[in-house]
Image: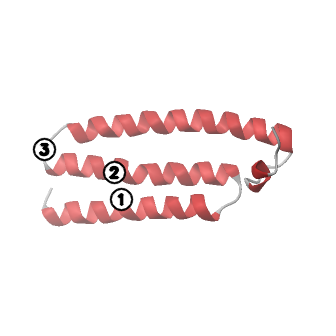
Amino acid sequence: MTGSDLIAMMILAAGLFAIGLFGVLARRGIMFQLVALEVALSGPALGFVAAGAYHADPQGQGMFILVLTLAAAEVAVGLALFLRIRRIAGSDDSDVISGMKG
């Protein structure tokens, strides 16, 4: 992998992170926010793999596995919270959460 390939991959990783962050901040539906958060997490994961490939170091792949594990845990907890909030509030709008008491 050349230096220009690394720069291109890092720009792509930053773009994925920016798109995911925008999705989390702009969308009101909890499921859309969870999907956008997954897109945001894929950006740094791609950056780790690209940097590891550039430096011929397997630690980038190890960090990718860590990010993948964290993303799976985030999906499990987020989906459980989504189902609970939808059952209690009857809506998947994230603004409903701020109006709940207790």
Q: Which residue is mark 1?
A: 13
On the rendered structure, is 44 left or right of 51?
A: right
Does label 2 or label 3 sit earlier along the sequence? 2
Amino acid type at image mark 3? Ala
Q: CA distance from mark 1 to mark 3?
A: 19 Å
Disc 3 target residue: 56
Q: Is disc 2 surrounded by few (<14), some (14 to 19) or many (20+) residues within 10 Å?
A: many
The percent coordinates of residue 32 (x first, y second) are 65, 54
Q: Position of residue 64 (x, y in %)?
A: 34, 40
Coloured how?
A: secondary structure
Q: Secondary structure at mark 2?
A: helix
Task: Report the side of 12 relative to 53 (left or right).
Answer: right
The kind of residue on which mark 2 rests is Leu
| Relative height, residue 94 to residue 74 (above, below) | below
Residue sitting at x 75%, y 56% = 95
Q: Which residue sits at x=40%, y=65%?
A: 15
Q: Is residue 62 left or right of residue 30?
A: left
Per the model, the C-alpha gap separating discs 2 and 1 is 6 Å
- Which residue does the numbered mark 2 point to in the structure image? 46
Image mark for residue 81? none
Q: Please say if 78 is above or below 5.
A: above
In the rendered view of the protein, which quadrant contains the C terminus? top right
Quadrant holding the N terminus? bottom left
- Judge the density around disc 1: few (<14), some (14-19), many (≥20) Cα neighbours within 10 Å: many
- Residue 38: percent from left, percent from top: 51, 48
